Amino acid sequence: MTFSINGRSVAAVPAPGQCLRTFLREQGCFGVKKGCDAGDCGACTVWLDGVPVHSCLTPAFRAEGRAITTIEGLERDGRLHPMQQAFLDAQGFQCGFCTAGMIMTTATFDEAARRDLPRRLKGNLCRCTGYGSIADALDGKVNVEADVAGNACGASLSSPFAHDIVTGQARYTLDTAPMEQMLHLKVLRSPHPHARIKAINSEKAAAVPGVVAVYTWRDVPRRLYSTATHEDHLVDPDDTYILDDVVRFVGQRVAAVVAETVGAAEEACRLLEVEYELLPAVFEADAAMKPGAPVLHERSIAFHDNIYVDIHGELGNVAEGFRDADVMYEQTYSTSRVQHVHLETHGCLAWRGDDRRLHVRTSSQAPFITKQKLSYLFGIFDRDVHVFTERIGGGFGGKQEMLCEDLCVLATLLTGRPVMWEFTREEQFIGATTRHPMKTRVKLGAKRDGTLTAIQVNVVSNTGAYGGHGGETLAAALGSPIAAYRCVNKKADGYAVYTNMVPAGGFRGYGASQTTFAIECALDDLARMLGISPFEIRRKNKIHATDRIESIWKEPSDVVMGSYGIDQCLDLVEAALASGRGDPIPEGEDWREGTGVALSMLESGPPTEHRSGAEMRLLADGTYHLAVGSTEMGNGSTTSHRQLAAAVLGTRAGRIAIINGNTDRTPYDTGTFASTGTVVAGQAVEKTATALRDVLIDFASREFRCDPADCRLQDDTMLCGNRTISLAELHAAGAAQGDRFEVRRKAYLSPRSVGFNVHGARVAVHRVTGEIRILQSVHAADIGRLINPMQCRGQIDGAIAMGIGWALTEKMVYDANGAMVNAALRDYRIPAFADIPRSEIYFADTHDSVGPLGAKAQGECAINAVAPAIANAVTDATGVRFVDLPLTPDRIFERLGSRHGPPRKAYR
C-alpha cells in the first residue's frame, strides 16, 4: 500500500485493525499524540485531504491514496504555518502535549468557525492552559516579549522548546523509534476490591504468539515500598509490593505480560486464569474506621486497624472559645475523588545500554527518587541506574509516583531486552492515583462583629488501598487553610484511612484544597448568620503581616511571611466584582444570580526535606550551559530558570542552553512538585549563576588587571573599566590557564514563604435544570516578583480551569463493587473550551524575602480558592448551601425543587 504523508510517498502495510495514529507514529510522526485512543481529546488530530480527523478512530488502511498531513508537515520551506506562528507568538501552550492536535484543528478555521469556538473546539482538550492562551493565539495576540540583556527577570519570554512544540519536534516520554528487540508490557488488573490470589494459570497466555514472559507475585522481589516519591521516604508507609498475592482495589496489578507487540501482551492478559479467594471490602472511610470493619493491612503498617495515621493538635482552648462566642456555626462538607487527567499518560522505557547499566526513560516528576527506589527494590548499585525524562505531558502531582518503572525494569533485568509500557486512559483512571476525597466538619465561633473566637476542624481522608501521600496531604489539610485566619483558639483532628478504593496521591493543592473548600464555605455561612459581607469577615480575621503563621501545632515552624499581599488581593477581587464586567445573567425568570469569594494561603513547598542543585559553565563560544535536576512538564521551570540565571549574569536567556531531569547529566533534585521548581531549584540556579558571575569577574580582574568593582557582565561581554572583552575571548584566556569556568551550588527548602490567592465568581443558577453558568471569574495572587508574567498568568488560568472542573463536573463514579464506571474522558468530563470563562487575573505588588530574586510559588496555590468561591456564589444565588462537590445539576435540582428563588440577602 502507498501513503502520502506530508508530501512524502510511503510504501507500507498497516497491521490488521491498526489505527492511523499508531501507523503514523511508526513512520516517525511523533507529533501525533495519544491522549485517549477514543476520539475524546483531539491530541491525535491530523488532516486527511485537508480535513481534520482524530487519527485514533481512523483505520490506517482508509488513508491510502489520500493526502495525510501531520503537524510536522505544516511548515513549508522553513516558514511556519500562520497558526503555528500564532501559537508561538501567544505561547498558546504549557506542557504542549495537546498543541499539535490543537493547531491541526484550528489551522482549518475560517471566520465563521472562529466565531463559534466553543462548538468547534469541543473535540480538543487541554488540561494545562485553561484555554486562555489558546484563545489568545486564535485572536492573534502576541504575548511573548523580546529577549533583552539586563531585562530577563520580569519579561514574558518564550519557552526554549516553543518552536519544537508548535512544529511537532518536541520529544515526550515515548516519542522514540522502537529499540532493537523491544518488548511491550501490559498488566492484568484485579476485578475485585479485596481478594487473595490462590493460583494463576498462565499456560494459555504464554502460548499466545509473541509472548515472551508472564510475571506474577512469585517472580518479583518481596520488598515493601511506597509508590510515592519524597526526599524522606519515612513520611510514606511501606505498604506496597511490585506484585502482591493480595489485591486491595479494583484495578490493582495482578500479573504482567511482556510480548513482541502490544496486542499480543493484551491478549495474553485476557487469557490469564486467576483463582481468587474473595475477602470482605470497605469503600467509605467512615465505615472503615468502625470496629469490625475489614482490615486491609497488617498491624505493623497502619497506626490502628485501617487508620494509617491520625493527627491531633490544639492552640489555646476551643471549648473556652466557643463559650465566649456570640454565635456558632457547624457543618460537614465533602469533596470528591478526581483524577489529574494529564494528557500524556504514565509511560516508561527501560533497557540495558552498551555500558551494561540500566537506563530508564520515564514521565516521572521525580527521576532521582525513582532511581533510589529502583536501586532498593532490585538490589542494584546506585551507579548502575540512569533515570531521565524528556519533555513531560503534564503532571499535577500524578507523576510524583513510581507506577510503571518497576515492572519495566523487572522485565528488562529478566529478559535482557528493552521494555516499554504506556498506560491507556482507562488504566490512568483505575490504576493510577487520585485526589484524596475528604469529609471535613467545621465548627466556628464568633463575636457579633465577626471576630473569630474558635475554629475546630475534623477531617477524615480516604487514602484508598495504599497510603502514599496520605499523611502528608492530611497534614497539609490541617495546616495553611487554618493558619490563614487569626484566632487564639484552634483545634483539629485528622484521620487518613485505608479503604478498598484506588489509592489517592499527590494532586495540585495537596490536601489544602479540600479543607480550604470547607473552611471558606463555613466562613461565608457564618457571615450570612451575622449579616456581614464575605469580604468584611475575611478582612477582619485574615492573618496579619506580623503574625506568627500558626495552625494547630505548638512546635516552631520554618514557615515565614516572606511577602504579604492578601490585602491587595481582596481589594482587587472586590473591585473587579463590583465593576459590572463579565456576562449578563441569562434571560428567563428561572435564573438566579449570585457572587462569591474565597481566600487561600499555601506554603511555598512541602514541610519535608527538599533539595536541589544546579551546575553552570561558560562555553568556548561565550554562551552558557545550565544543568538543573528538576523536570519540565508544562510548569515553565526551564524558562524561569534561564531567566533567573540571565538576570544574574546580565545576559539574554537565549544565550543559556539548559538540560534538566537527568540523573547522569544534572545535579540532584528531590523532584518537581509542591511548586519547588521555583523556590528550590530556582534558588539553586540563582546561587549557581551568582557564583559563576563572581568567578568570571575574579578571573577578568586578575587577567586584565582591573579592580573587581569595575568589572561587570553585559550580554556577551565582560566590561573591565574602559575595556570590553568578549566572553569567548575570556574563555580562551581561562582555558589557556586550565580554568574551566564551571560551578555547582545547592539549595534547600528552608525557610518557606507563603503565597496568597483570592478568587471571586459571579454565577447564574437555573433553579429548574440546575445548570450553573459562570458569568465572571476574577483571581488575584500574591506570588512575589513575577519572573515571567505570561507564564504566571498561564499557570493561574490552568489552575482556575482545573478548579472549575472540580467544582462543577469532575467526579470518579463507582459501582457497588468499587469499580469505576466512567473511566473515559467523554464520561468523566474535564472542562472543554466552552466550559471555561475568560478570567480577570491580577497580581499583588510584592517582593518575597525568601524566594529567588523575590519570587515565590505559583503553580499550585491558585486552585484552592476556586471551588469554594463558586460554591459560595451558588449559595448566594439560591439561598441554599450545597456541601458536597461537584455541584452537578442533579444535586442542584434535588435541593431547589420548586422553590421560587432565594430569600433576600442578609449581607450588609
Image (cartoon, helix red, strand yellow):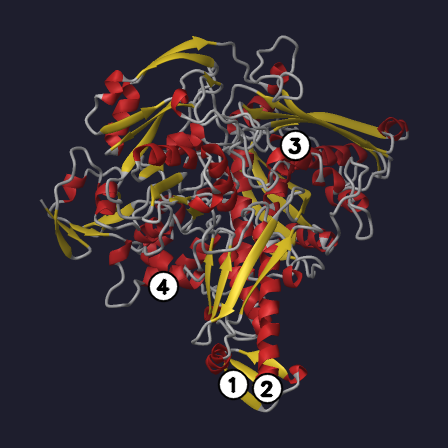
Q: Nearer the viewer, residue 90 or 110?
A: 90
Q: Which residue is mark 3?
A: 474
Name the residue carrying label 2.
720
State the SS at label 4.
Answer: helix
Disc 2 residue type (three-letter): Cys
Of callouts 2 and 1, the N-terminal one = 2
Circle 1 packing at 10 Å, graded few (<14), some (14-19), many (20+), is: some
> From the viewer's perspective, is the residue at label 4 or at label 3 nearer?
3
Quarter holding the N terminus is: top left
Task: Looking at the picture, tell me which residue is in the foreground, 467 or 772.
Answer: 467
Residue 496, percent across and down?
64, 26
Query: Element at badge 3?
Result: helix
Question: Which residue type carries mark 1?
Answer: Ile
Residue on which the image places disc 1: 725
Measured from the top left, where is residue 243 in percent x and y?
43, 24
Depth check, mark 4 against mark 2: the one in front is: 2
Q: Three-letter amino acid code at disc 4?
A: Gln
Amino acid carrying mark 3 in the image: Leu
Seen from the viewer's position, the closer of residues 851 and 695 is 695
